[in-house]
Image (cartoon, grey):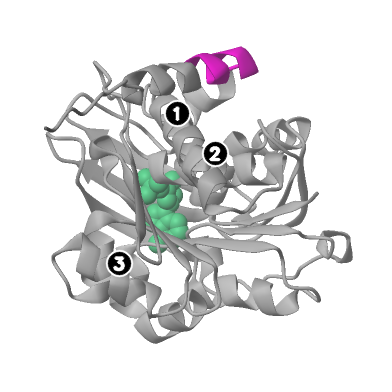
């Protein structure tokens, strides 16, 4: 059982209607690793600059995240992203993206990662994501990919190529519309599935997530929370919970993906409770079980339809 995670490791600066952070640790790969390591060991592929704190790398190692595939470019700067959330906390504007070390990143898959059975391609340069797939000598049982509007705007051809290679694609609703040119999410899903992936997950922030496969659709709500403090990383945390559950159970059926979506949603609901990765570092296995139980209660209803 082996999970390889690819994704950005970053500094983020976040503004929400309720507060502002200085440069804090972020990145899609970072959130995925913090989350998925609750379920399985993680082998991480990424790149950071000399300014990325060693203590952060040590904290991930202590969580069971193998960093042999993380390159440290001593004389360069770590990827930086800043964003501002709108009042509804469901939408945001990117204020700045400084690629820095990501600009010329050539990933190298270590030999010890060749046993990869599950591959989680977190948000990153699409050609880096596809390069990792190509370097693996055996195709993993399941390849899951996340991406973002940023890459649709500047590297659509590379992005479409990478999408054609994966089994499961995750995007949010506005990205699904942008990628397909369709407003209806059902039509968008049909078009995106025709691009290659057998499964499509459309994340709708506080409105939950949809899983499409063939003619089947499954919907999972998001937990209604009194307070959302910082939604950054919720999508990546969702991805980490989804793939973490799949790896732990080694079951890639549609039925098990439904459960994986609930696990992902439960993990994301913790992520948004504090700034950055703070909340993910605190939660225990018991917290995770409690939150999953809340989801079961949320959607569990007994209905007897009597139509005469
Ligand atoms: P999410 O809120 O789940 O969409 O993910 C937010 C994280 O994605 C932040 O921690 C950012 O550092 C990271 N991020 C933002 N833009 C990019 C990008 N273009 N490529 C890779 N990672 C990014």
Q: Find numbered disc 1 in the image and state the secondary structure of the residue it sits on.
A: helix
Name the N-terminal-most of marks 2 and 3. 3
Please give the name of the residue rendered at 49% of the width and 50% of the height, measured from the top-left corner.
Answer: 28
Q: Give the vertical position of 102 relative to 16 (above or below).
A: below
110 left or right, relative to 296? right
Of residues 14 and 283, the one drawn nearer to the viewer in this rendering: 283
Classified by dominant secondary structure, the portion drawn in magenta counts as helix
Q: Look at mark 1 in the image and give the residue it sits on.
A: 266
Q: Residue at x 48, y 69 (%)?
A: 198
Look at the image and say whether residue 254 sits in the magenta stretch: no
Mark 2 vs ligand 1: CB below 8 Å: no
Q: Are the residues flagged by discs 1 and 2 in contact, CB closer than 8 Å?
A: yes
- Give the x, y percent position of residue 84: 22, 43
Residue at figure coordinates x 23%, y 38% from the top left: 207
Q: Which residue is mark 2?
A: 241
Say few, some or many: other residues with alpha carbon within 10 Å of mark 2 (under 14 / 14 to 19 / 20 or more): many
Q: Sequence order check: which comes first, mark 1 or mark 2? A: 2
Mark 1 C-beta closer than 8 Å to ligand 1: no
Local packing at callout 3 (Cα closer than 10 Å; few below 14, some 14-19, many 20+) is: many
Q: Tell me the SS state at disc 2.
A: helix
**Residue interval drawn in magenta:** 283-290
Comparing marks 3 and 1, which lies closer to the viewer?
Answer: 3
Q: Which residue is mark 3?
A: 189
């Amino acid at each position: 059982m082996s999970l390889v995670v690819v994704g950005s490791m970053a500094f983020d600066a976040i503004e929400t209607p309720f507060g502002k952070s200085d440069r804090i640790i972020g990145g899609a790969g970072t959130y995925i690793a913090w989350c998925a390591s609750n379920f399985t060991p993680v082998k991480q592929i990424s790149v950071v600059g000399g300014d990325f704190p060693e203590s952060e790398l040590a904290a991930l190692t202590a969580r069971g995240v193998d960093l042999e595939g993380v390159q440290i470019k001593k004389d360069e700067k770590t990827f930086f992203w800043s964003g501002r959330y709108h009042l509804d906390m469901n939408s945001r504007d990117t204020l700045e993206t400084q690629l820095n070390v990501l600009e010329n990143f050539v990933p190298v898959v270590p030999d010890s990662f060749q046993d990869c059975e599950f591959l989680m391609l977190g948000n990153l340069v699409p050609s880096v994501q596809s390069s990792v797939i190509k370097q693996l000598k055996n195709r993993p049982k399941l390849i899951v990919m996340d991406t973002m509007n940023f890459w649709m705007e500047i590297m659509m051809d590379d992005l479409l190529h990478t999408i054609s290679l994966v089994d499961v694609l995750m995007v949010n609703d506005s990205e699904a519309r942008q990628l397909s040119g369709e407003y209806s999410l059902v039509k968008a899903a049909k078009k995106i599935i025709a691009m290659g992936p057998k499964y499509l997950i459309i994340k709708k922030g506080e409105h939950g997530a949809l899983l499409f496969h063939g003619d089947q659709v499954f919907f999972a709500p998001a937990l209604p929370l009194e307070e959302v403090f910082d939604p950054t990383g919720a999508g990546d945390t969702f991805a980490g919970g989804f793939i973490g559950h799949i790896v732990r159970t080694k079951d890639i059926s549609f039925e098990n993906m439904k459960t994986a979506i609930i696990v992902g949603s439960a993990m994301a609901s913790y992520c948004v409770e504090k700034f950055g990765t703070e909340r993910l570092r605190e939660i225990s296995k018991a917290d995770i079980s409690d939150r999953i139980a809340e989801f079961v209660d949320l959607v569990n209803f007994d209905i007897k339809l009597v139509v005469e």
